Amino acid sequence: MRTTRVAVVGGGLGGLTAAALLARGGCEVSLYERSKHLGGRAQTSDVEGFRFNLGPHALYRGGAAMRVLGSLGVKPKGGIPGEGSYALRAGRLHTLPRGAVSLMTTDVLTLAGKLELARLLAGLPRIDTEPLSRVSMREWLATRLSREDARALVGALTRVSTYCADLDSLSAEVAVSQLQMALAANVLYLDGGWSSLVDALEARAREAGAKLELSARVESVVLQSAQVHGLELADGTVREVDAVVLAGSPGDVASLVPGDAVLARDAADAVPVKAATLELGMSSLPRPEALFALGVDGPWYASVHSASARLAPEGGAMVHVMKYLTGADADPREADLEGVMDVLQPGWREHVVAKRFRPSLTVTHLLPSAKAGGLASRPTARVPHVSGLFRVGDWVGPEGMLADAAFASAESVARTLMQRQAAPRRAVGA
Ligand SMILES: Cc1cc2nc3c(=O)[nH]c(=O)nc-3n(C[C@H](O)[C@H](O)[C@H](O)COP(=O)(O)OP(=O)(O)OC[C@H]3O[C@@H](n4cnc5c(N)ncnc54)[C@H](O)[C@@H]3O)c2cc1C
């Protein structure tokens, strides 16, 4: 029995996880990352001592990422946010309902809205989400809540737990599952930023024998009769392998297998979820008790991540502000995001040490829509028509959203390839 040789293309969380799991499972793994750094969208930059993730990143404590990281012996460190939370409506802050007391005292809802919301939240954990795959979140909200204020609040909670503002498209199966997970187990902001996950995965992959090459762009997958034969790198080198795991975007995957109409169609069909982000490193906070604002009448988010995790120098604060974008919102303005800070932290401008605005980041490559049929409609990790070809990412497979989907798809690819490794030798992934 010969060791299965696997090439992983992409050194973000998905690619690194696949590499670590496969190398641990006994495969001979080489990972190629085109940029100078590992991490992809999970990278963290150090700006004047402030740790800037690429937009606000929160790890779902009840999701696939935690499960897979646990299986690799990685224990993410950080803190759980929650204190000092407000709902933002019509340019004013209101108590954000987070439990029975805040629900009853907030003025962001009418009494009738509060009662409806309380009923919905009480029953939420028991909702079977699978039958909701073809129902949009907007339709679902309309059937469950008659009060507009309650619908707007659940819409805001949906945005913060899916990053998706297009409730007309988003499948209720996905949205309700994310709400269930977020409300049951909350999230973790990570000490040092998400690069702590990247570093831990890199270490696990290297320890297990995976070879990681940086500044190594893969040009194409070399096929022979619809079967993986190897990889061609940008410098023209060809590496022979038994299987290839593609861990980039749908467009990256299609471009690596030129002429493949199925992969080209997957890429064309994938509607991404995008966000505009503003990162702020501050010497201090004008209002230290105001730590989180969630837009109820607009797609706004602001959170002092350093209040829960080590992300700023002593006494300083690291704040993420975000606008959840829809396809119609092509030109978000920095001033709009700054306006959210004017409400949460009046006078903030005098405290700014470092600032970074990104008008459009891809949060996830594929919005799981009701029209397509929710999670089951996402491309499978194994590319069915090419033996030995796999893909990994936040747009792949039937489990989870965002990074959870990248981890879950990596786990599924590793499971399949390791079964092959253990089985008598034949074409990998055939
Ligand atoms: C603003 C923002 C906020 C987010 N917030 C959250 C959050 O709160 N919670 C959460 O779970 N997720 C969040 N995410 C999503 C999360 O960051 C991603 O799902 C995750 O990082 C995806 O990892 P990945 O490995 O699948 O893809 P990527 O990180 O995109 O990595 C792909 C890698 O492949 C490389 N590559 C592509 N083609 C080639 C090639 N031909 N040769 C070599 N290398 C190649 C790229 O350079 C890249 O490094 C957020 C994302 C953004 C942008």
Image (cartoon, rainbow, N blue to C red):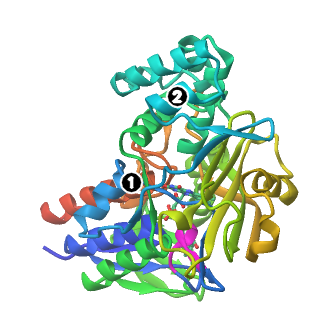
Residue 154 seen in render:
yes
Is residue 49 part of the magenta span, yes or no?
Answer: no
Binning the other alpha carbons within 10 Å of mark 2 as few (below 14), some (14 to 19) or many (20 upward) gives many
Residue 243 seen in render:
no
Binning the other alpha carbons within 10 Å of mark 1 as few (below 14), some (14 to 19) or many (20 upward) gives many
Q: Position of residue 93 (x, y in %)?
A: 71, 41
Q: Splitting the image into 4 quarters, where does residue 410 fall?
A: bottom left
**Residue span colored magenta:** 38-45
Badge 1 element: helix
- Name the amino acid, label 1: Ser
Q: Splitting the image into 4 quarters, where does residue 225 fall?
A: bottom left
Note whether 269 is above or below 80 in the view shown.
above
Note whether 155 is above or below 17 in the view shown.
above
Asked whether 40 or 222 is in front, the reply is 40
Note whether 161 is above or below 142 in the view shown.
below
User: CB under 8 Å between callouts 1 and 2?
Assistant: no
Q: Residue at x 39, y 74 (%)?
A: 7
Asked whether 127 or 110 is in front, the reply is 110
Residue 103's label in the rendered image is 2
Q: Splitting the image into 4 quarters, where does residue 200 fall?
A: bottom left
Asked whether 11 or 335 is in front, the reply is 335
Is residue 43 part of the magenta span, yes or no?
Answer: yes
